[in-house]
Amino acid sequence: MGCVITGVGAVSAFGVGMGPLLAALAEGMRAVGPIRHFDVTGFPTRVAGEVPVLDIDAGWLSAVGGLPGEHLDALAASGLLRDRKVGFALAAAHEAWRAAGCGDAEREASLVLALGLEQAFLEDFAPLLTPAGKLDFAADAALSAPPVRLRSRVDLAAEWVRRVLDLEGLALVNVSACAAGGLAIAQGAALIERGLASIVLAGGADSMVNPLGLGGMSRLGAPSPRAAPDACRPFDRRRDGLVIGEGAAVFVLESAARAQARGARPLARVLGWGSTQDAYRVTAPRPDGARARLAMQRALTRAGLGPEAIGYINAHGTGTPLNDPAEAQAIASVFPRGVPVSSIKGAVGHLMAAAGALELAACMLPFAEELLPGTANHLERDPACAIDVIGETPRRARIDALMSNSFGFGGQNVAVVLGRA
Amino acid sequence: MTPVAVTGWSLRTPLGVSIDEVLTRLAAGERAAAPNPRFDATTYPCTLAAVIPGQPAKTRHARFVRRMGLWGMQAATDAMRQAGAIGGDRTGVFCGYGGLRAHWEDILGPLQRQRPDAAGAWEAGLRLLHPFWMLQHLSNNAHALLATDLGARGEGVTLGGANAGAQALGAAAAALHAGTIDVALVLAYDSLVEPEMVLELGMREVESQVVPGEAAAALVLERTEDAGPRALVRLRAADGADGARGWPSTRTLVHVARGLGDAELSGPRGLPEQPGLPGLPGLPMLLDGAGVGDEPAVLAELGAGATFPSMQRQLGLLGGAAALVQAIVLGSWLRAGRARSALGLSAGAPGLCGAVHVDVS
């Protein structure tokens, strides 16, 4: 039984929709810039791949996201749209749902959504701080009735996607850090392969572009210290860290038989996936990339393909000093004859839990336009990354299969192989 | 559904941190509910909570993982030791993570001078965040550290939410059956006893005997043919859902239970009755979760006349850890010769439920 993609939705720093994402990538554009929706004065890092919306509200979801209005007032009233990934997930899921031509007959769909950290809201804390410097949660009467403020549950975005689209199937929330997006697509395809579902909405949503997220990442030292639009330079000799991004991407996956029966046009096929764990260090990838290599090999095996069949790799490519050479080594060992590689993180930032999903959405460009996305800010080749990195300009090529890598905190690795429909 | 073998297990619950102790106290009908020791809850709608006694042993991982994650890691290590399992390329870790339970003490300093509009947030205190604060709040930190400690390099995943334990069991079983791994370490942990969760649950102790609880638990799973006589019990696990805005319907719970395939859903007869573990004719069944409210209807649908009414009345609500604790309690009870099979159902989130079927066949 084959698994096909029949709809895709995306929210990225290029805007809402697959159209803006693919058009910008085809032009070799980048959207990383100064953070605008909160005051970043003093933060060590002040740039991000920020979705161009200051405040997400019911009006934005309706006008830009195209969502039906019946649930939006309740969602907006709950205050939970302050967790930006909730709105991003809804907009991307709705776009995918519409693009696939889904309706009442598809309500049985399962959902596998990759989500990032629960979000806490600074503005809620001030009224709760007592003179003694403690938090008195019960002091705020509004807190005694759900939905609670202060934080959004880890699975909240998934709950609202199910509610707005009226889904009845299984619902899983993958929280495997930066590998979660790729894993969610793999899990969705696995549900179809194992006969547990015939249609699955799978993808990811995340935003750490908020005071606590940016503050925590800054203190960790992961972002590039340069608050510049070219701060993330994947595979470049001058790379010095990542840039935070935000957004979402969601796919409608279904069995080929189901898609054919309902007349849905496949956009691509999910051919295989592989997952491994580094089990090396919490804060660093294995330098030799051995476990990442195995994830890629397993994905090829499951796809029934040899390395020569892969025409493009969308790399994890964070632009950090340690990730890129480890990934390059892994790619070089699996693909000794070479393969074009690029990373879109220089253009849209690192979407964390949603990264793998958005990067798979970007992988629609080769199939739709016969263009391989470029690598924004990749200007100087690094001998430690001895692979065929596509520079800033997209490369024209017709390919039949590609691979997308995602490697998460703690050494979680996943590779997904897609094929032309 | 083909069962898998459980070859190791361990738990940490409000009624104790060893299986024997927990079973003994469950059988004695003890309730773990007590005034919430985690914070001053005297002004809250529910002042009681069921909390794991003591503190997890301090390890070097305390830099990265907080209390519940440490409990989960310790249970997982115990389970692996019991199973005699080691890591390697064919061992995977599957984690059910109930959700972030903020450690407010870690962040109060950086919050003290924050403005409601978050203006100047860095200088107002975020610059004081601990460098590892982000790592301490990552959803998969326990997973990552365990995999590193054990050298478990196989396929694995961390799932989140109040049904995450049941889902992690299902994902692990699927990976075993698919042959991508030979050993699955499944752990789950959740705590509902912190202030924001107590308020979100909206529980009032005068209306319900169920209080917020917490637990950590771990199971080591292998294919039954690989485990052979090392199997403690056999396990089938599934998760299910419907479109309900509230808790899953009786129909859904029954559907998921029946979806366990060839699991025998009509049990033995004439079980001895005990306090807390009433033995009645039929399949022993354990129903847990805030959303399992219509036990008689579920029982009638499944044709099972027997039930452990609910362990949550004694242990508190266990959220994402419920399915694993159910599997261990039921499995241990079966191994004591009480019956040959048992079923646990849990419903911890709107529209979502889990099911575990344990047998000693």
Image (tube, coloured by chain):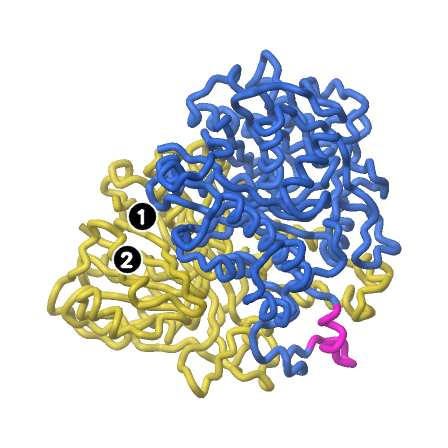
Chain colours: A blue, B yellow
Q: Is residue A257 left or right of residue A397?
A: left
> Does the magenta segment cover residue B95?
no
Residue sitting nearer the eye, A21 or A138: A21
Task: State the SS at label 2.
Answer: helix
Q: Amino acid at mark 1?
A: Val
At which x and y percent is residue B164?
Answer: 45, 55
**Marking on residue A230:** none
Q: Is residue B330 left or right of residue A395?
A: left
Q: Quadrant of residue A120?
A: bottom right
**Marking on residue B6:** 1
Say if residue A314 shows up in the picture: yes
Mark 2 touches mark 1? (CB < 8 Å): yes
> Does the magenta segment cover residue A134?
yes
Q: Chain of mark 2?
A: B
**Marking on residue B331:** 2
Question: How many residues crowd around disc 1 within 10 Å: few (fewer than 14), some, or many (20 or more)?
Answer: many
Give the quadrant of the N terminus of chain A: top left
The answer to whether residue A107 is above or below residue B309 is above
The answer to whether residue A129 is above or below residue B65 is below
Q: Amino acid at mark 2?
A: Gly
The answer to whether residue A393 is above or below residue A114 is above
At which x and y percent is residue B86?
Answer: 42, 38
Q: Quadrant of residue A310?
A: top right
Q: Which residues are magenta?
A: A123-135
